[in-house]
Image: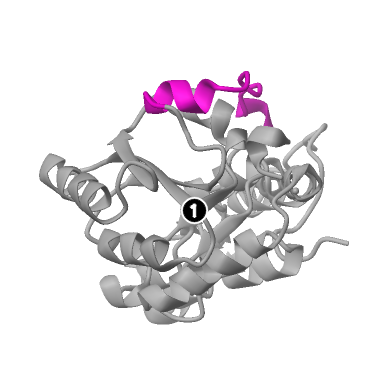
Amino acid sequence: HLPDLVIESEPNRAAERLRYYRLQHPVVVIPNTIPLNTMPNRAPVGTLSAIAGRALPVDRRILVFTGGLHPCVPYERIVEAVAESSVPVFLLAFCHGQPQRVEAFRALVEKTLGPARGFVRPSVPRALLLSCLWEADAGLVYYPFDAEPTINQLYCAPTKFFEYLAMGLPVVTSSNPSLIPIVRQFGLGECAADDTPAALRDAIDRVFTRDTSSSWKSHIRSVFACSLAYEHHTTTALDTICATLEPERPRPPVHGIPQGDIMNTPRSSARRS
């Protein structure tokens, strides 16, 4: 039996499911983005340092990595890329996952980068972390396909990608075809050319060679608000869902939701922004 309705979070994955299962109805795409009205207010300067539990260097660019440290995230490559970067970078990670894996990541950062270049700590409440991400200089999204060769990995669409953008952070990403078009179209950061640590290092260098100033961050926040926020995708998605489940019942108009399209829409450090 084939389902009457399938909802996906990424257009390429939707196309794959449509083809593989020979579905009779289009797959509805609702990205893993976040609503504008859930974004916290910007926390005072120094909050990022406070929740990290240590002072953060003022002479290094802060590259923040948040979220699950699952096997699909090869953290060894992240550490190697930061270690070999030609620009002064500080890796700040807030992670959850299997305790032994998080501890292994922490130990590797301490051994390879030392306290002057990196720090790993457990996750903190999401709203608190979001409120102070603006103090960082860039956000890392790293899901290389060869670490877990699945469709979900290839066409990853993590919420953290949109969280970074919502708070105005340029992004450094792996070479996923689900991320590259968005990053390049809107000028949101840099993507690795392939799955190697060297390619990730080069992407880090490129993003920090640019001036991650308040003007770039303002541009990124504007792109998110005008084109990538959750509100821009609900109207079309709900129309499709209602037409599929209740084809004879007209849906009343939804007022107050801005229109937009995820793929088609007409810097000193953050601590100094």
Horizontal side of 248 relative to 92 (left or right) equals right
- Which image quarter is the C terminus in? top right
Q: Position of residue 133 (x, y in %)?
A: 56, 35
Residue 41 picture location, percent across and down:
65, 21
Residue extending furthest toward the right: 266
Left or right: where does residue 259 sit relative to residue 251?
Answer: right
Rendered position, 81 above or below 133: below
Q: Specify few, some or many for label 1: CA neighbours under 10 Å numbering under 14, 14-19, or 20 or more.
A: many
Asked if residue 231 shows in the view, the reply is: yes
- Residue 41 in the magenta stretch? The answer is yes
69 on left or right of 26:
left
Q: Nearer the viewer, residue 225 or 170?
A: 170
Eyeballing the image, is 225 above or below 49?
A: below
Residue 164 forms part of the magenta stretch: no
Amino acid at dot 1: Val
Along the viewing direction, whichever of 212 and 133 lies nearer the viewer: 212
Whether residue 72 is visible, yes or no, is no
Residue labelled with disc 1 = 89
- Point out residue 213 in the picture as x, y percentages from the top left corner: 74, 47
Q: Position of residue 257 (x, y in %)?
A: 78, 37
Which residue is at a point 26% across and 56% down the rendered structure image?
112
Asked which secondary structure carries label 1, the reply is strand
Identify the residue at image location x=31%, y=73%: 150
* Quadrant of the image occupied by residue 51: top left
Indicate the quadrant where residue 102 lies: top left
Residue range (magenta): 36-54
**Residue, x 43% and y 79% (percent of image)?**
22
